[in-house]
Image (cartoon, rainbow, N blue to C red):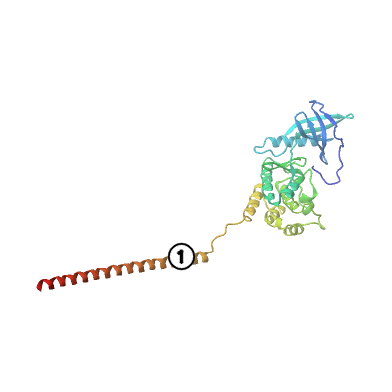
C-alpha cells in the first residue's frame, strides 16, 4: 500500500484471527491477512458480517479522518467509482488505547503490473487511458492522487477496469504531497515541485508506463535526469510507441489528464495496422490494361460485325445473279 519509502515500519502487527470490535457501532471484524502497510497505517483483509472487506487502522486520527474525507468526496463524483466504497468508521480499544480505523470495499483483482505481465503489454494503452479518465474527474474535484503506482492500481474484471485502492496520498490541490514513492516522484527524478497539482500525477503516470516496460524498475544514476529516463524509453520497443505522451508528461507539458489521454490514444491509433492502399501507378497501369483489353474486345466485335455484313452482301449478290440467270433462260425459251 502507500509508502513514503521502503523503510517504513509497520505501525501494527496483528495475526490472522484477531477480532476487532468497533467501540461506537459494535461491528465485529476478524482479520484474515495483511494487505499492505505504509507510513500512515496498515490495511488488513477482514471478514465482516457482509463478507470480505478491507480495514485500515492507524494510531493517527488525523490520517484516518483525512482519508475518510477523501473517500466521501470521491463517492459524490458521478461516473464509475474512483476509489473503494466507504463502509464504516470507528475506534477499537486495544490495551487501553484507541486504534482508529475505517472499513472499505475490498476490491478483488490483480495489481496493474502483474496484470500486464500476465495478459500482455497490449493492454497498457487501454488501462492507462482509463486511469487518465479517472484522474481527470479527481482533479476537477480539487484533489491530486499523489502516490500513484502500480501497487495502488487494481484491475478488476471482466470487463476489465482499473481501480485506485489506496487514497492515503491523496492531497487537496495546492498543498504539499502527503505521500509518495520515489520511483514515481517528480522531486526524486527531476528535483521538481511536490506541490499537489495535476502535472504531479501525470508525471507519475509517465513513470508507471516506464515501470510496465521495466517491471524490476531501476535506480537513479547520479543525480538522475530526463536524459536517463529518455534513454530508458528508447531502449524498449514497447515504450517507443508511447514516447511522445510519456516525455510530455515527465516534462510537465500537459495541462490536464484528458489532454494526456487524447495524446495517448492518438499514438495508439497511429500504431494500428493500416489497410494497404493501391499504388497510384499500379492503379493507372491496371486501368490502362483494362482500357487496352476493352479496346481490343471492341475492335474484335467491330471486325466480327463487319465480316458479318460482308457475308450478307455476297449472299444477296449471288441470289440476284441466279434469279437474273433464270429470267434470261426463261425469255430465251419463249423466243425459241
Tell me the residue that label 1 is attached to: 290
Q: Which residue lies furthest to the right in this view?
A: 95
Label 1: few (<14), some or many (≥20) within 10 Å?
few
Residue 321 sits above or below residue 125 on the image: below
Q: In which quarter of the image is residue 243?
A: bottom right
Residue 282 sits above or below residue 198 on the image: below
Residue 114 sits above or below residue 221 on the image: above
Residue at the spot 71% in from the left edge and 58% down from the top edge: 237
Q: How many labels does the image show?
A: 1
Q: Position of residue 269 (x, y in %)?
A: 62, 53
Q: Is residue 149 visible?
A: no
Q: Quadrant of the N terminus?
A: top right
- In terms of depth relative to the viewer, which is nearer, 136 or 92? 92
Q: Is residue 335 visible?
A: yes
Label 1: which secondary element: helix
Q: Position of residue 30 (x, y in %)?
A: 82, 31
Residue at the spot 65% in from the left edge and 47% down from the top edge: 258
Q: Position of residue 106 (x, y in %)?
A: 75, 36
- In terms of depth relative to the viewer, which is nearer, 295 or 281? 295
Q: Quadrant of the C terminus?
A: bottom left
- In terms of depth relative to the viewer, which is nearer, 271 or 95? 271
Q: Where is residue 113 in the image (x, y as percent from the top left)?
A: 75, 48
Amino acid at each position: 500500500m502507500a509508502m513514503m519509502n521502503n523503510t517504513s515500519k509497520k505501525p501494527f502487527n496483528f495475526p490472522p484471527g484477531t477480532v476487532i470490535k468497533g467501540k461506537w457501532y459494535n461491528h465485529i471484524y476478524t482479520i484474515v491477512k495483511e494487505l499492505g502497510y505504509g507510513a500512515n497505517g496498515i490495511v488488513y483483509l477482514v471478514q465482516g458480517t457482509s463478507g470480505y472487506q478491507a480495514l485500515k487502522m492507524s494510531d493517527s486520527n488525523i490520517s484516518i479522518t483525512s482519508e475518510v474525507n477523501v473517500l466521501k468526496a470521491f463517492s459524490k463524483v458521478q461516473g464509475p467509482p474512483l476509489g473503494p466504497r466507504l463502509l464504516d468508521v470507528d475506534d477499537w480499544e486495544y490495551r487501553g488505547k484507541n486504534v482508529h480505523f475505517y472499513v472499505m470495499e475490498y476490491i478483488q483483482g490483480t495489481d496493474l503490473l502483474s496484470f500486464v505481465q500476465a495478459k500482455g503489454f497490449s493492454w497498457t494503452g487501454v488501462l492507462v487511458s482509463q486511469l487518465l479518465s479517472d484522474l481527470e474527474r479527481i482533479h476537477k474535484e480539487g484533489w491530486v492522487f499523489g502516490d500513484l503506482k502500480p501497487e495502488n492500481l487494481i484491475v478488476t474484471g471482466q470487463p476489465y477496469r482499473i481501480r485506485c485502492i489506496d487514497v492515503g496520498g491523496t492531497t487537496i490541490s495546492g498543498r504539499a504531497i502527503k505521500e509518495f514513492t520515489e520511483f514515481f516522484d517528480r522531486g526524486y527524478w527531476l528535483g521538481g515541485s511536490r506541490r499537489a497539482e495535476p502535472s504531479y500525477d501525470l508525471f507519475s503516470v509517465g513513470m508507471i508506463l516506464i515501470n510496465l516496460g521495466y517491471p524490476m524498475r531501476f535506480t537513479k544514476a547520479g543525480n538522475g535526469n530526463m536524459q536517463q529516463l529518455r534513454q530508458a524509453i528508447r531502449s524498449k520497443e514497447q515504450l517507443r510507441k508511447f514516447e511522445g505522451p510519456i516525455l510530455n508528461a515527465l516534462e510537465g507539458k500537459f495541462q490536464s489528464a484528458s489532454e494526456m489521454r487524447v495524446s495517448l490514444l492518438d499514438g495508439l491509433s497511429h500504431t494500428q495496422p493500416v489497410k494497404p492502399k493501391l499504388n497510384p501507378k499500379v492503379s493507372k497501369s491496371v486501368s490502362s490494361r483494362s482500357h487496352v483489353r476493352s479496346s481490343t474486345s471492341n475492335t474484335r466485335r467491330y471486325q466480327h460485325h463487319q465480316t458479318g455484313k460482308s457475308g450478307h452482301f455476297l449472299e444477296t449478290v449471288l441470289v440476284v445473279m441466279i434469279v437474273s440467270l433464270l429470267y434470261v433462260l426463261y425469255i430465251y425459251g419463249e423466243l425459241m
